[in-house]
């Protein structure tokens, strides 16, 4: 028995939706650095695409595939900066969701930074939060 693709069928009532997606997708992000260990971020992503009124739904598994593809590129050294992760995901979402005109990706990451205590200059680590956001739109 073959299941029909409900998401691509025409709805009875057509309503354009500006943000359909997933939130709080947790991923470990490694960004390769020349001559150094990779930068490691513990990240949470929110990923959205717009949905035209001619469709009942979006294939959200594509969002997870895109994130995993870009994270592999980061490990391989193709992504040079953490900010580039969001922009690559946003652009690739447009490729995977051919009906979408606009995509949005937000990332919040925890990153450990080496510091020294102010008085005794003792080495320590501090967790900082890194925020990044990217929008992509078809032209």
Image: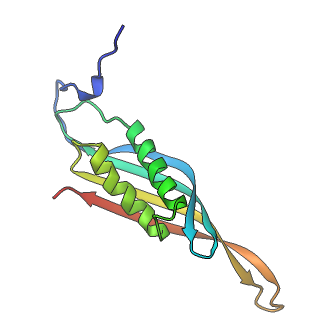
The one of 8 and 81 positioned closer to us in this rendering: 81
The one of 105 and 83 positioned closer to us in this rendering: 83
Q: Position of residue 104 (x, y in %)?
A: 34, 55
Above or below, comparing residue 49 to residue 118 in the picture: above
The one of 116 and 36 positioned closer to us in this rendering: 36
Q: Say which residue appears at 48% left-offset and 53% top-offset.
A: 45
Report the quarter where the C terminus lies. Answer: bottom left
Task: Name the colouring of the figure.
Answer: rainbow
Q: Position of residue 39 (x, y in %)?
A: 60, 68
Above or below, comparing residue 73 to residue 128 in the picture: above
Name the quadrant containing residue 42.
bottom right
Report the quarter where the N terminus lies. Answer: top left
**Extreme bottom residue here?**
119
Q: Say which residue appears at 53% left-offset and 54% top-offset.
A: 44
Q: Is residue 18 visible?
A: no
Q: Is residue 32 left or right of residue 67?
A: right
């Amino acid at each position: 028995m073959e299941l029909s693709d409900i998401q691509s069928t025409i709805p009875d009532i057509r309503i354009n939706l500006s943000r359909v997606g997933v939130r709080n997708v947790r991923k470990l992000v490694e960004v390769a650095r020349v001559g150094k260990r990779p930068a490691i971020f513990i990240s949470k992503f929110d990923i959205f695409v717009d949905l035209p009124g001619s469709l009942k739904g979006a294939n959200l598994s594509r969002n997870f595939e895109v994130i995993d593809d870009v994270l592999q590129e980061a490990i391989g050294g193709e992504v040079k900066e953490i900010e580039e992760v969001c922009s690559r995901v946003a652009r690739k979402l447009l490729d995977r969701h051919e009906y979408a005109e606009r995509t949005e990706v937000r990332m919040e990451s925890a990153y450990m930074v080496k510091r020294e205590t102010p008085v005794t200059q003792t080495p320590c680590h501090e967790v900082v939060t890194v925020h990044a956001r990217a929008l992509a739109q078809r032209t």
